[in-house]
Image: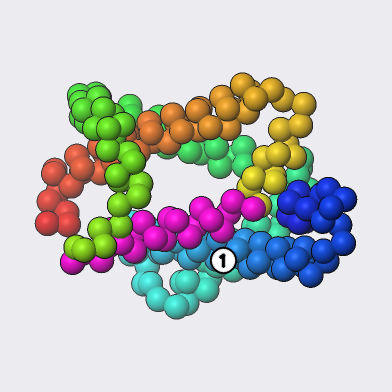
Amino acid sequence: FCVSDYLFGSARFRGSRPLRFLVDWVTLLAILTGVGATFATAVLHLEAGLRSLAGLPGGVGMHVGLLAAMAVGFAISSLHGVQAGIKRLSEWCMWLTVALLAWVVLLAPTGRFLAPALGALPAWALQFPALSMGALPFADPAWPKLWTVKYWSWWIAWIPFVSSFVALISKGRTVRQIALGGVLLPSLFCAVWFFALGSAAIHVQELTGLFG
């Protein structure tokens, strides 16, 4: 599918081929940028995990190997189609995510997980607008600026593809079902995920003295 078909589907814009061509190419470049950023972030995370847990040396060789492994897995799942490949791979990833979350929650002290979650939830709700838009333009630290701008560019890059994909798979569903299954429940799961993994990371840091 082409994004221009969604933007200029009416008869009024059917003759504007240069504009449709420009929109489709800008969308393609945005998607490539978003996929590249996702791959780069995943490689850095995997490299840090392998260096920490397995003691493997990092570097360009590991980066190329991880990129090649992810590219092969992506190609195999895509060649098998949506139902046999991408859907099955997504289900495996989801079950592994749920298993990791349950393992962390069950092993971590209950109070260590619940207390930060209950205390952080109201603060997050009150500060969400400022935190989501704050790049600290007049402050010295560069991390908040780069992190916020990185997420802005990431979401903008994924919007054309993801919005069209969600529209296609949502055919026949009500607005309530889309809002519940596509927005509310994933957001709730992400909140529980960050509460659990963040609290566990702070707990491990306090016990071991890692990272100062």
Q: Is residue 142 magenta?
A: yes
Position of residue 89 relative to residue 107, above or below, is below
Which residue has dot 1 on it?
A: 33
Which residue is at a point 37% across and 67% down the rendered structure image? 56
* Magenta extent: 140-160
The x and y percentages for residue 199 are 25, 37
Q: Is residue 167 magenta?
A: no
Query: Which quarter shows the C terminus?
Result: bottom left
The x and y percentages for residue 92 are 59, 40
The x and y percentages for residue 6 are 76, 49
Magenta stretch: dominant secondary structure: helix
Position of residue 144 relative to residue 58, above or below, is above
In the image: residue 210, left or right of residue 183: left
Which residue is at a point 25% across and 44% down the rendered structure image? 201
Disc 1 marks which amino acid? Thr
Position of residue 88 relative to residue 3, above or below, is above
